[in-house]
Amino acid sequence: MTEKKTVSRRDFMQTTGAATGALVTAGAFAHPAIGSIKGANERINFAVLGAGGRATSAHVRHLTDMKAEGKAVDIIGICDVWDGSKDVKDVRIKVSGNWVTVGRGLYPVAEFCGLKTDDKLVTKDYRKILASKDVDAVVIGTPDHWHAKMAIEAMESGKDVYCEKPMCHTIDEAKQITDTQAKTKQIFTVGVQSTAHPIWKMANDAITSGKIGHVMQVQTSYYRNSDVGQWRYYPLLESMNPKTVDWKMFLGTEFGLAPDQPFNRAKYAQWRCYWDFGGGMYTDLFVHQLTHMLQATGIRFPRRVVGGGGLYLEYDGRDVPDVATVVADYDEGCQVIVTATMANNTPLPEVIRGHTGTIAFENGDSYRLTPQELASKPAPPSFKKGDSGPLVTTPFNAGGDADTRALWDHFIECLRSRNTETLCPAETGYAAIATVNLGVDSYRQGKAYFFDKETGKVSEADDSWAKKWEKVSHERGKPNQVMGWKADPLEGSVLVPPAYQKLEGDWVDGQDPAKKA
């Protein structure tokens, strides 16, 4: 690749200017290139760290598709702790219009990519990949507990990073990744594929323009069902054993990543079920929904988080719950509810509620903006869905994994232009991790938590949150608006007190406050 030129967010915005605004208004994301693209025909060499199902069926597939289309990209390295097997039939890739079974693990995926088993970049040790000057960028598809170490070391070695979601395993790791990206200026993105859809930016434009007034509450969910238990559908094979799996490297115990423990096929292949390696639905599924809702609303880091749930059905030896809910409160005066069960697939609608309007999303690719009816009298509970407004949609096709391809296309363009503003940058990944991981800790520890976005410090919650808002109310304060608010500060954000409220106030020494001069 050519010499890497760093472009700041300010430079990017100044260079793209009005054209960027026009594209965003039309519902598309701004092109990441800064001026003319440099080195457009120079090959970008990728290595894949973790050749499992997602990395192979999605990322290897898209990169090989790009190469077949004549784009200057290639996969020159594969790292995985398991020798692998072609007997895993659920990993398939479309080649020349035909679906072929690739299998999982080191050697099957390397063979598919045209690499020899004795190639120095076909390895069980990721450090050999990072030491190679021939590798420009890495795809991280390992279990969650390895994401941060690999991402940080990759950026420090001068490599760009596509990191599968969740960005990492802990909040402290999320801050370290963000700090490293800011220091190294490497291009980094989190693989939350829905962030490639322009519908979230379109919703954000409506919100920051004051179309639904002050944003009060966000609701999203991820519901699905399984007759074998979530993540147990990843097959266990006899060929997964201590001779074929570098179990010590998988655990990462010597690096402080997971406690030492005996080899276990289920913990290797179905690691999402265990706290040592992942966070269950909190990190594997909630991150999907939460990230694009952060994109839509313009909020980022929570201030107060509590998590609930439990293991109510899937009694199969797992750690993680099959029912979970996270409630996060933000300094903008907004609450986010993320909820799910793994034993029923009837979801809660995805909704953003403002004081004067409601945005209800449909199928993740369109929404309806419905004005609120403001009443001045008591009313019974409402059963309205908030979806009677006109449908807002885009021509973007999110089906058939097209959103992942769109995320990849944007990422590749960012690599060439050296624009660090990917569709899901480290800062957004950090914000999502802060919310879902505090939900995990709350569930497991039975406590509510505060998060300090300035320092990254976590502390146990107390009564100061409630007292803060009571104080704002008593002082007749004004609402805080979401990031990027362009409307009048009080648009859709004030109450109109009835005339008789002039009669309120404390009586002091028998004096009616309403009769004071």
Image (cartoon, rainbow, N blue to C red):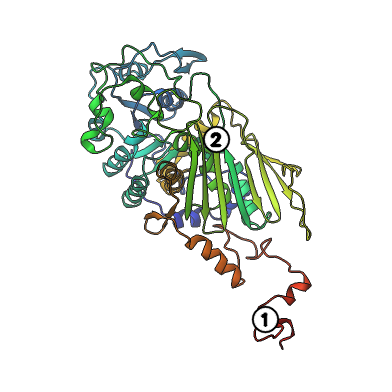
Q: Tell me: 265 left or right of 97.
A: left
Mark 1 element type: loop
In which image quadrant can residue 235 be found? top left
For the residue marked with disc 2, what is the amino acid?
A: Ala
Q: Tell me: 377 left or right of 321.
A: right
Seen at 39% across and 36% down, the residue is 163
Q: Nearer the viewer, mark 1 or mark 2?
A: 1
Inspect this view and state whether residue 32 appears: yes
* Circle 2 residue: 340
Looking at the picture, how far across and down is residue 269, in whole percent?
A: 37, 22
In which image quadrant can residue 486 be found? bottom right
Task: Name the image quarter holding the N terminus.
Answer: top left
**Image mark for residue 507:** 1
Question: Given the current orientation, which residue lies at the most extreme bottom position?
Answer: 517
Q: Is residue 129 above or below residue 491?
A: above
Q: Is residue 248 above or below residue 13?
A: above
Mark 2 element type: strand
Task: Name the image quarter holding the C terminus.
Answer: bottom right
Q: Tell me: 451 left or right of 498.
A: left
Question: Given the current orientation, which residue lies at the most extreme left position?
Answer: 254
In which image quadrant can residue 402 be found? top right
Looking at the picture, how far across and down is residue 117, in whole percent?
A: 26, 17
Looking at the picture, how far across and down is residue 349, in whole percent?
A: 64, 38
Q: Nearer the viewer, residue 436 or 84?
A: 436
**Image mark for residue 137:** none
Seen at 31% across and 26% down, the residue is 76
Inspect this view and state whether residue 420 appears: no
For the residue marked with disc 1, what is the amino acid?
A: Trp
Looking at the picture, how far across and down is residue 302, in whole percent?
A: 48, 53
How crowded pointer 1 is (Cα within 10 Å; few <14, some 14-19, many 20+) is rated as few
Seen at 59% across and 59% down, the residue is 485
Q: Is residue 113 above or below residue 297?
A: above
